[in-house]
Image: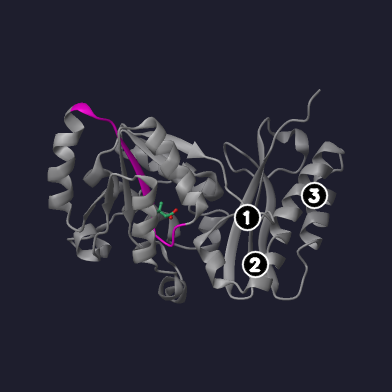
Amino acid sequence: MKAFRTVQALQSHLSTIREDQTIGFVPTMGALHEGHLALVRQSLRRDDCTVVSIFVNPTQFNDPEDYLLYPRTVDADLALLESKGVDVVFIPTESEIYPHGRDAWKPIDLGGLDQILEGAHRPGHFQGVAQVVKRLLDIVQPHRLYLGQKDYQQIAVIRKMLHHFQLPVEIVEVPTVREPSGLAMSSRNQRLSALDRLRASRLFEALVYLEQMYRDEVPLPTAVQRAQALLDLPDFRLEYLVVCDAQTFRELQTWNDAPQKIALLACWVKDVRLIDNLPLDNPPS
Ligand code: PAF
């Protein structure tokens, strides 16, 4: 495995590779877990050369404390990636990513996605994601980009960004990986105590309960209320739990409002903010 810290060194390595190999790219902020490894495995399977980046992007943190407390485990991350057979790791400094400063980005039209759900609760977050992923794609120029479905709205934002800049990259979406308790894997889980980590599995339980009520034809507003009530626990603070059109993110009032639906939530457990989602497939007819 080769590790690069500068854009120039990375690009000169990739330029020869690109002549006859496909490049798969997995952008990360480190603190790697099985969810990231699922993306890595897909890339290793489908592409000739797998590039993983590790960069905790300051511009996507609306909360400075969240940025400071974000887990950083670079040595362990590198050992893990090496053991999985990753070809290239890119660990840039901030000045490599933003040579003209963080503020040089002009916000782009994200079709309103930066105003709703995660966008509403984390002002500026999705512009920061668009900014860093655009920069990373310009540097790596991969054939395929591997993204996890846990960040469902983020995938939609990145699709909008690709369209905006007409970037010819194929997105490969990889299903959410869960802990045995059902809790969606996330780097932020590291900040929870063992007990709170177990208690946080209630988030997924709420989504599964909602899915069951969908199958049982419980009216949508009642189902959402009951699922929300499941998260009414000490130290939990729910920001949203909604059912949306899986394409447009429009919040639904009845189950029949959209052919493809998804339940999405964000909830604090103590001082850690977690998100999760569950696509609601049509019940078999
Ligand atoms: O999903 C993440 O870890 C980040 O948002 C990403 C895509 C690596 C951009 O910093």
- Mark identifier at residue 197: 2
Report the Cα–Cα distance between label 1 and label 2: 10 Å
Counting residues from the start of the chain, the first of labels 2 and 3 encountered is 2
Is disc 1 in contact with disc 2, using a CB cutoff of under 8 Å? yes
Q: Amino acid at mark 3?
A: Tyr
x, y (%) of residue 161?
Answer: 37, 43
How many numbered dots are placed on residues in this image? 3
| Residue 274: image location, x then y, percent | 59, 62
Are the two marked residues, 2 and 3, in contact with CB atoms closer than 8 angstroms? Answer: no
* Residue topped by disc 3: 209
Mark 1 secondary-structure assignment:
loop
Q: Residue at x 77, y 59 (%)?
A: 228
Where disc 2 sits, the SS reads helix
Among the two numbered marks 1 and 2 on one chain, the one whose residue lies closer to the N terminus = 1
The residue segment tinted magenta is 20-32
Query: Disc 2 versus disc 3: distance between alpha carbons?
Result: 19 Å
Q: Is residue 153 left or right of residue 254?
A: left
- Pointer 1: what residue? 179
Where does residue 145 sit, x and y in percent of width and height?
A: 37, 39
Residue 113 visible at all: no
Q: Can residue 223 be seen from the camera position used here?
A: yes
